[in-house]
């Protein structure tokens, strides 16, 4: 009987491990390909390990392309500022919808739900025209301002604050804190799990954005890293070895951010699942 009971579990593990290997294989191939010379990559085949490993690809993108470090800093600045602005606005908006009573609150929430269904690509051209009229095209603001709020995370934070214990806020108000002080000193720190969850995803969205920089940025020195990667392509050839090396560099900040916020990130996902 015990052996019969173990078979479904063993089969499940085999399926999960196989799926993990299939999912991770392209990522491992890209990482190891960044250490291969161009000739070895274009030779074909799915061999993982490089026959002649080299760091020349990384040396080239940092030394022969003077704008590459600038693109990294551009992406880091835009993603960091955009994430901070998003976290503040999304959390305050979610708290307002959950706690404050004002005319039209329910209609505003329904409008947010409706806007969540609209594909972001539809707003690219209207945003372009607005930013052109404001004179902020080809600036960092062109990438930060249109994404200053995210309706999905406003919804997430609203759901969190609806279930937040009112007794905590009432105790803070008894101690003499007003609504604004209660939010920043008490409520916001206690919402760090949900805040960390949205911070990770928002940062990832800004960091990986390609269409918006492609439309709104024209100066090479203001390119983001994702947009700068296309400089390794030409009409005649694609320098896959340099693209792989640059791609590996581009995922390092995401990995570091996830490691730093992993504890709160997992808590936030569990909270979101409970809601």
Image (cartoon, rainbow, N blue to C red):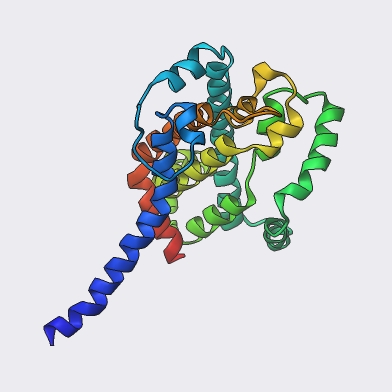
Residue at image position (77%, 46%) is 123
Asked if residue 175 shows in the view, the reply is: no
When asked about the image quadrant of residue 105, the answer is bottom right
Residue farthest left in this picture: 2
| In-image side of 24 versus 146 (left or right) | left
| In-image side of 44 versus 11 (left or right) | right
Establish if 19 lies above or below 38.
Answer: below
Q: Could you say where residue 234 lies in the image, as x and y percent from the top left? A: 68, 27
| In-image side of 267 versus 108 (left or right) | left
Asked if residue 221 shows in the view, the reply is: yes
Residue at image position (73%, 26%) is 217
Residue at image position (61%, 55%) is 97
Q: Could you say where residue 218 lies in the image, as x and y percent from the top left? A: 75, 23
When asked about the image quadrant of residue 273, the answer is bottom left
Establish if 51 lies above or below 7.
Answer: above
Q: Could you say where residue 41 lies in the image, as x and y percent from the top left? A: 47, 34
State how many labels appear: 0
Q: Could you say where residue 156 lies in the image, as x and y percent from the top left? A: 53, 55
The N terminus appears in which quarter of the rendering? bottom left
Residue farthest front in this picture: 43
């Amino acid at each position: 009987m015990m052996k019969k009971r173990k078979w479904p579990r063993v089969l499940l593990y085999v399926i999960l491990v196989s799926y993990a290997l299939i999912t991770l294989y392209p990522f491992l191939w890209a990482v190891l390909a960044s250490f291969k010379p161009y000739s070895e990559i274009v030779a074909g085949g799915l061999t993982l390990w490089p026959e002649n490993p080299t760091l020349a690809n990384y040396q080239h993108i940092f030394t022969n392309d003077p704008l590459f470090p600038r693109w990294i800093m551009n992406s880091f600045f835009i993603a960091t500022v955009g994430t901070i602005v998003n976290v503040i606005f999304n959390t305050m908006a979610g708290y307002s919808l959950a706690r404050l009573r004002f005319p039209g609150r329910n209609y505003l929430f329904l409008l947010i739900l409706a806007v969540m269904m609209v594909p972001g690509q539809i707003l690219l051209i209207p945003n372009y025209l607005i930013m052109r009229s404001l004179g902020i095209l080809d600036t960092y603001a062109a990438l930060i301002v249109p994404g200053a709020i995210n309706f999905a995370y406003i919804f997430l934070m609203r759901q969190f604050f609806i279930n937040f214990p009112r007794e905590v806020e009432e105790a803070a108000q008894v101690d003499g804190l007003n609504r604004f002080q209660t939010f920043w000193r008490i409520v916001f720190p206690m919402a760090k799990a949900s805040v960390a969850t949205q911070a990770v995803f928002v940062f990832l969205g800004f960091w990986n954005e390609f269409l918006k920089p492609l439309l709104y940025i024209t100066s090479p020195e203001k390119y983001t890293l994702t947009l700068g990667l296309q400089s390794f392509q030409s009409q005649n050839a694609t320098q896959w070895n340099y693209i792989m090396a640059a791609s590996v560099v581009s995922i390092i900040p995401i990995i570091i951010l996830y490691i730093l916020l992993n504890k709160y990130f997992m808590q936030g996902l569990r909270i979101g699942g409970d809601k």
